[in-house]
Image (cartoon, grey):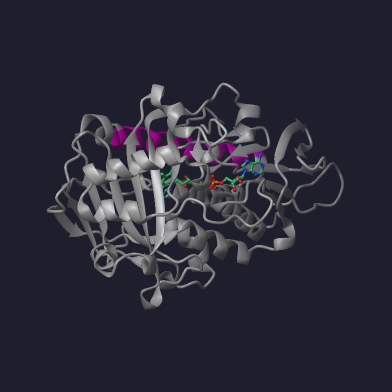
Amino acid sequence: MAITPGSAAPRRPRAVVAGGSIGGLTAALLLRDIGFDVSVYERSRSQLAGRGAGIIAHEVTLRYLVDSGRRLDDLTIEGGLLRYVDETGGTVHEAPSNYRYTSWQALYRGLLELFDERRYHYGHALTAVRQDDQGVDVSLSTGATERCDLLVCADGVSSTARSLLLPEVEPSYAGYVGWRGIIPGADVRQGLLHELRFDITYQLLRAGGHILAYPIPTADGHSDGGDIFLNWVWYRNVPRERFRWLMADHEGTLHSLSLPAPSVRADVLDELNAAAETQLAPALAELVLSTAQPFVQTIVDVEVPRQVLGRVCLLGDAAFVARPHAAAGTAKAAADAWALAEALRKADSLDDGLARWETTQLALGRQLVARTRTLGDGAQFERSWRPGSTDLLFGLWAPGDARFLPR
Ligand SMILES: Cc1cc2nc3c(=O)[nH]c(=O)nc-3n(C[C@H](O)[C@H](O)[C@H](O)COP(=O)(O)OP(=O)(O)OC[C@H]3O[C@@H](n4cnc5c(N)ncnc54)[C@H](O)[C@@H]3O)c2cc1C
């Protein structure tokens, strides 16, 4: 699709992508491939590292890498069983999982390698957006302004673009947080590694809440030779009156959406470890206690009424934040990017393409937020999960579509 300004010769359309994580990078690569002149502006000052830990792989998340020649086995670990245990460690349910596990780092590094790093600008946060009939002006934290035909905002859960364009949309706290940790396989006891290294292991807690653990590839995407990490997420209910105690750092500053490992206070960590000892199955307790630097992510719902505002679109977590129980947030960001490129490729004009894209992606976002809200409330508060139920399987469009079934 070429842009024809007035009577001048057609020129390549120009796109700016704000936010250079999985959603932003996938969009940047795909827009480049369909003829856009693309630049990415990322708030972080250096290569993003250690974000988000483990990710359940979906075909759509891996699609760009696999289409570019990367081997599935180099990007992911094939899962063994899906297992539920009780607090004694006894098995309550087990079945083949058919999941594949990857890491945020392996996806990010792989995508970044395929993009022109000279067009990926660290330390540039989007700060303001203005539009006129001809295009969009993007103001950046460096003081620079970029003019473009299309602005893709993939700036995540705390999206600046969303708060500028849709200030009425606020993240809504779900009543619980995800404690997360990753630990190199080499740093855990052999017996524990053997117990957890192939399978996804869940425990539903009697008092509400749940924990899951699964293996992921190392940061460079390799899992050969037994070189893996163990990844866990423990969803713990935290009433509002306790939230400040948990999320205040050493200086008393409140972190509303995530508390990075160095900011977790010793008294908070002590409480986590004490709870692990009394509430978790022995292997899961040992895993939590062996993790040097766990961190916290607040679980929120975010829903936007629109994803397209003129020539600006909101993609991935900038638009919808779904609770992690479908393990589909990254997949949705990637699916938004694929659908955007496809809609623009087929459309006669940018505006037509954006309108078509918005219709399908609003529907996807809404169903995912609704489904994961039900799942989350069921595990955390209603204790309605039944191990083995197909409704609990990971999936983006529907439960279970994250499985890689044997062909
Ligand atoms: C506990 C937990 C477990 C999860 N597990 C899974 C899982 O197993 N599978 C899965 O698919 N998903 C999972 N998710 C969700 C997943 O992490 C997110 O949905 C996904 O990272 C969204 O990708 P994104 O590219 O939209 O945004 P992000 O990955 O959040 O990236 C946003 C980027 O924008 C940058 N940025 C922010 N503001 C600006 C600005 N003003 N200007 C420029 N750049 C900016 C940020 O630095 C960041 O790099 C989980 C989430 C949680 C909380």
Q: Position of residue 139 (x, y in %)?
A: 77, 38
Q: Quadrant of residue 149?
A: top right
As for residue 180 lying within the magenta part, the answer is no
* Residue 30 vertical placement versus 113 (above, below): above
Q: Main secondary structure of the magenta part?
A: helix
Is residue 28 toward the left or the right of residue 259 in the image? right
* Residue 226 vertical placement versus 353 (above, below): below
The answer to whether residue 56 of the structure is visible from this angle is no
Q: Position of residue 327 (x, y in %)?
A: 37, 48
Figure label count? 0
Residue furthest right as drawn: 8
Is residue 394 toward the left or the right of residue 146 in the image? left
* 55 vs 233, nearest the viewer: 233
* 333 vs 251, nearest the viewer: 251
Q: Position of residue 48 (x, y in %)?
A: 60, 55
Q: Position of residue 8 (x, y in %)?
A: 87, 48
Residue furthest bottom as drawn: 225
As for residue 361 lying within the magenta part, the answer is yes
* Residue 178 vertical placement versus 282 (above, below): above
Instruction: Give the residues in magenta.
Output: 351-376
* 311 vs 124, nearest the viewer: 124
The answer to whether residue 156 of the structure is visible from this angle is yes
